Amino acid sequence: MVDSSIIQMAPSIKCRHVAVIGAGAAGLVAARELRREGHSVVVFERQNQVGGTWIYTDHVEQDPLSVDPTLPIVYSSVYRSLRTNLPRECMGFIDFPFVIRPRKSRDPRRFPSHGEVVAYLQDFAKEFAIEEMIRFETAEESDGEGGITKWRIEFTEKEEKVRLPELYDAVVVCNGHYIEPRLADIPGISSWPGKEMHSHNYRIPEPFKEQVVVRIGSSASAVDISRDIAGVAKEVHVASWSNAADTFIKQNGHTNLWVHSMIERVHEDGLVVFQNGKTILAHVIMHCTGYKYHFPFLETNGSVTLNDNCVGPLYKHIFSPAFAPSLSFVGITWKVLPFHLFELQSKWTAGVLSGRITLPSKEDMMVEIKTEYSTLEAQGIPKRYTHCLGISQFEYFDWLASQCGCSGTEKWRKEMCLTSFMRVMDEASGDV
């Protein structure tokens, strides 16, 4: 549990007691930067190792759509064949490059597997002695009390039922956003007899042998999964909102893969009807439709809300004006260079907490946030894309670097990232 309580704290304190939620890439680098800045840090991690979203498990949830709140959650969305879609050179932290390290069972490829990323993060944690700050297999729960200056963490350790409370000066949320699935709205789905699932519960292609599969979505992982399944399935049909209504293309290089417009509706006899008028009898509909932000452990009495997958209000995607600087989020933005982003956000957060870097007033932060929201609305951009940076990430990176007094993003890193982004976009638009 993470919850704020009213306990007065002197504003001159420079070394703060900070709780970091999550020991994935964001949580690890946040812990390092906070300690470098002189803070006392405890990292809470519900799994038994570092790595966060990159940790693979064969296990999937009992509910293939992951919507039943009474069933256990599997905290991994990684499929067996997953590899990075960015080259390792631009993925690493600034002073700890993601280079090939001679060790048995390591993956030397330029676009390595999830296991290689976890190994890199384990090496990072050991190099900077971060594991000594981590409490593994701990879960936080919220009791809903409010406040402004101290944060109470109530947590349970493995196989323990007693909540253990502790007080912290600040909380840095680094729990990722690849666990709570988003689902497409499909007319008629309640009476459709086939199997409906989210890619959160996809691991291997073999269960789809000789089946007709409809996949919704056009993300990089969606493209990967289509390739996986096409190797064993009878047919794979890809539906996407981004395709024109009359889209119907047989994918080059495949004999059993077609690209369509979005699903129009499904029927109780098993038929799936696309906007292009085509119909198929399908066994499976798989939602590769992304994820929702999810903070079940955090109670802010409505000061931080979720609206169409927009977390807000957040200044620069990090600080809640109502609680600044004691509540911050690292890793909210997407379509970015993730590890580089986490590092810069963590440096800024650590500097703000120590008082070395000054935030604007609460009122000025809110003015900027409202201006940003108005700009997105005027451009017709839905709220769910508030934290999608894309090309604008480099301006954001440079701003963070200037605040921290460190060097901006290297030219080669920007160029490599742009090249990779364009490749991924081309693959997604062609759908393989």
Image (cartoon, rainbow, N blue to C red):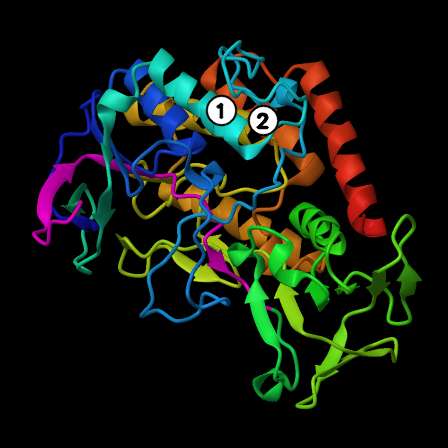
Which residues are the magenta region? 158-183
Question: In this figure, what is the number of numbered marks?
Answer: 2
Number of residues whose C-alpha sits closer than 10 Å to that of mark 1, classed few (under 14), some (14–19) or many (20 or more): many
Q: Residue at x 41, y 18 (%)?
A: 124
**Observer-nearest residue: 19 or 106?**
106
**Label 2 secondary element:** helix
166 magenta-colored:
yes
Q: Give the number of the disc on residue 200.
A: none
- The residue pinned by badge 2 equals 397
Q: Is residue 293 visible?
A: yes
Taking the image as shown, residue 164 lies to the left or right of residue 61, namely left
Residue 68, x across and y down, in percent: 39, 71
Q: What amino acid is labelled 2 in the image?
A: Phe
Measured as percent of width and height from the top left, residue 265 is found at 72, 82
| Residue assigned mark 1 | 344
SS at badge 1: helix
Vertical placement of 129 versus 166: above or below? above
Task: Determine whether, in the image, residue 292 is placed left or right of residue 146.
Answer: right
Q: Is residue 308 left or right of residue 258?
A: left
At 65% from the left and 62% from the top, the residue drawn is 208
Q: Position of residue 136 (x, y in %)?
A: 24, 36
Residue 299 quadrant = bottom left
Tell me if residue 278 is in the magenta stretch: no
At label 1, the amino acid type is Leu
Residue 379 or residue 78, whichever sits in front? 78
- In three-dimensional space, the C-alpha distance between marks 1 and 2, rounded to whole angstroms, equals 7 Å
Q: Quadrant of residue 358?
A: top left
276 lies above or below 74: below
